[in-house]
Amino acid sequence: MLLCYFVPYILIITGLGANNILLFWSLWFVMGWGMIGIGASVMHDANHGTYSPNKKVNKYLGYILEVIGGYSITWKIQHNILHHTYTNIDGLDDDISGFVFLRLSPRQRRYWYHRYQYLYAWFFYMLMTLFWMTAKDYLQVIRYKQHNLLSNQKISLRKAVLEVTFYKIIYYSYILVLPLLFSGQAWYYVLGGFCVMHFTAGLVLSCIFQPSHIMASSPFSLPVIVDSTYRMEDSWAIHELVNTTDFAPRSRIFSWFIGGLNFQIEHHLFTGICHIHYKKLSSIVKTTAESFSLPYHVQPTFVRALLEHAKMLKMLGKKEDPATRLLS
């Protein structure tokens, strides 16, 4: 995965493709796939603490996220804490909250333009990593400080902002400045290649994660008030099970490349287990769910999962709100 990202980069800054813009942009395109592999199959396990039984190995491998432009602390808060604890709960799960142009839950307010989101959502998915590597980390640091989530990571707002800034300077220095100086291409071609890389990574990563949760089979249940406190209607494990979908369970190469994230149910139930065990776990989880008359959502192929996700986007954008049917 690292070679898929860094070999094209080395070829770019050594001038390969200086006289061929298609070759030049193809190298950036391959780097985009390297970002996907690093994010899904290396960084993801490391920052969950499951890449290795050695905590130091996980810690230092987790920093590969900073190398590709992110920030581990905000990622852990958003993903490990909020997404994995409050999956599909509007206002708590950051994966579905905070973007007005996409309605990803029947609990969210609907605007007229959402009727077209099944067509334009893919464009915004393309922007996902680009937004992440520029503004998102700063916005999250501020918001997480307001909600007292930074203190749980034992870091102050000032230190977090300084770290984000430091890592961004390092990232943009090597990803843009060096190619501008040494690639032999005009600045606008370098910027275009940078966008090609991020558009590729953003679209594919979004297409991996969104069909795992934004599906018609997900109930999007909210906590209920019991004795003046919010409590889930179901246990945490059942909530994760019913709000998550597996896909392409027989595709070994695909599963290898995306770090087993097609077995999203198993990942959500067993976040402390390395992804190489998900396939064997899936048959156990499925059998257990069926024995308790619980649903086990799975789509046979990746393409089928994307189609079902697109149908859900269209359903969420209709004037006749799908909430009543979905939440009944």
Image (cartoon, rainbow, N blue to C red):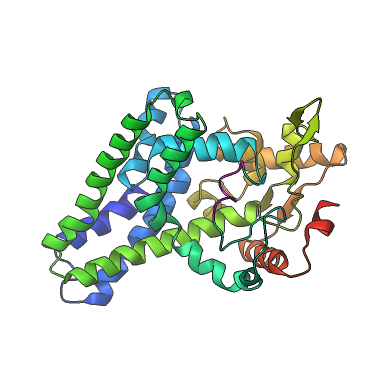
Q: Nearer the viewer, residue 202 or 222?
A: 222
Q: Would you say residue 68 is visible in this rendering? A: yes
Relative to 116, say whether 215 is above or below.
above
Name the spot of residue 302 as percent of width and height, x first: 61, 61
Name the residue located 81 percent from the left edge and 25 percent from the top edge: 227
Name the spot of residue 182 as percent of width and height, x first: 12, 61
Q: Is residue 96 magenta?
A: yes
Q: Is residue 215 left or right of residue 183?
A: right
Q: Nearer the viewer, residue 118 or 140?
A: 140
Count of numbered tags: 0
Q: Which residues are drawn in magenta?
A: 92-98
Q: Is residue 156 left or right of residue 273?
A: left
Q: Would you say residue 249 is visible in this rendering? A: no
Relative to 159, say whether 1 is above or below.
below
Q: Is residue 218 left or right of residue 53?
A: right
* Magenta segment, prevailing SS (helix, strand or loop): loop
Name the spot of residue 295 as percent of width and height, x first: 81, 46
Q: Is residue 85 magenta?
A: no
Q: Is residue 95 left or right of residue 129?
A: right
Q: Nearer the viewer, residue 10 or 156?
A: 156
Q: Quadrant of residue 210?
A: bottom right
Q: Quadrant of residue 238?
A: top right
Relative to 85, say whether 124 is above or below.
below
